[in-house]
Amino acid sequence: MKTVTVCESNGFAPSSKIILAVPFRGSALKKLKIELKTNGQLIDATMGHPCRSMIFLADPTGRVVATSITMKTLRKRFSQHRPDETEINEEEEL
């Protein structure tokens, strides 16, 4: 299982479970973050730093990771850990 580091303190998520990463800008995302936190669906990986990105996971509970890592850094990490075709096909068969 390939993983991507999603926070400053080596927190990680399975790269196959990440469906979307967006920069944390605008009031719509701020409202969504509050709603997700209220519903218990927010994983706060900011470690007290300002939120810079949100990562949406392919999770039955609809969890979202708030992280202090910039989109530029996440983009680099995703490109280094992108699952290859054989890994995707093996997971679909399970």
Image: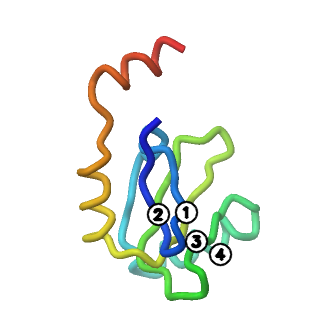
Specify few, some or many for label 4: CA neighbours under 10 Å numbering under 14, 14-19, or 20 or more.
Answer: few
Please say if the residues under marks 4 and 2 sit with CB atoms less than 8 Å apart: no
**In the displayed structure image, the side of residue 60 where residue 38 appears, left or right:** right
Q: Distance from label 1 to label 2 (Cα)?
A: 6 Å
Closest to the observer: 54 or 2?
A: 2
Against 50, is 31 above or below? above
Please say if the residues under marks 3 and 2 sit with CB atoms less than 8 Å apart: yes
Closest to the observer: 9 or 54?
A: 9
Determine which of the numbered discs, if any, sits on residue 6 in the image: 2
Specify few, some or many for label 3: CA neighbours under 10 Å numbering under 14, 14-19, or 20 or more.
Answer: many
Count of numbered labels shown in the rendering: 4
Please say if the residues under marks 1 and 3 sit with CB atoms less than 8 Å apart: yes
- Of helix, strand and loop, which one carries label 4? helix
**Amino acid, disc 1:** Gly
Q: In the current view of this chain or complex, which residue is farthest to the right?
A: 39
Please tell me in which quadrant of the rendered image residue 89 appears. Answer: top left
Q: Position of residue 17 (x, y in %)?
A: 49, 41
**Which residue is depicted at the point 58% across and 71% down?**
45
**In the displayed structure image, the side of residue 48 where residue 51 appears, left or right:** left
- Which dot, 1 or 4, sits closer to the camera? 1
**Amino acid, disc 2:** Val
On the image, numbered disc 3 is attached to which residue?
A: 45
**Amino acid, disc 3:** Ala
On the image, numbered disc 4 is attached to which residue?
A: 34
Q: Position of residue 79 (x, y in %)?
A: 24, 51
- Of helix, strand and loop, which one carries label 3? strand
On the image, numbered disc 1 is attached to which residue?
A: 11
- Which dot, 4 or 2, sits closer to the camera? 2
Against 51, is 83 above or below? above
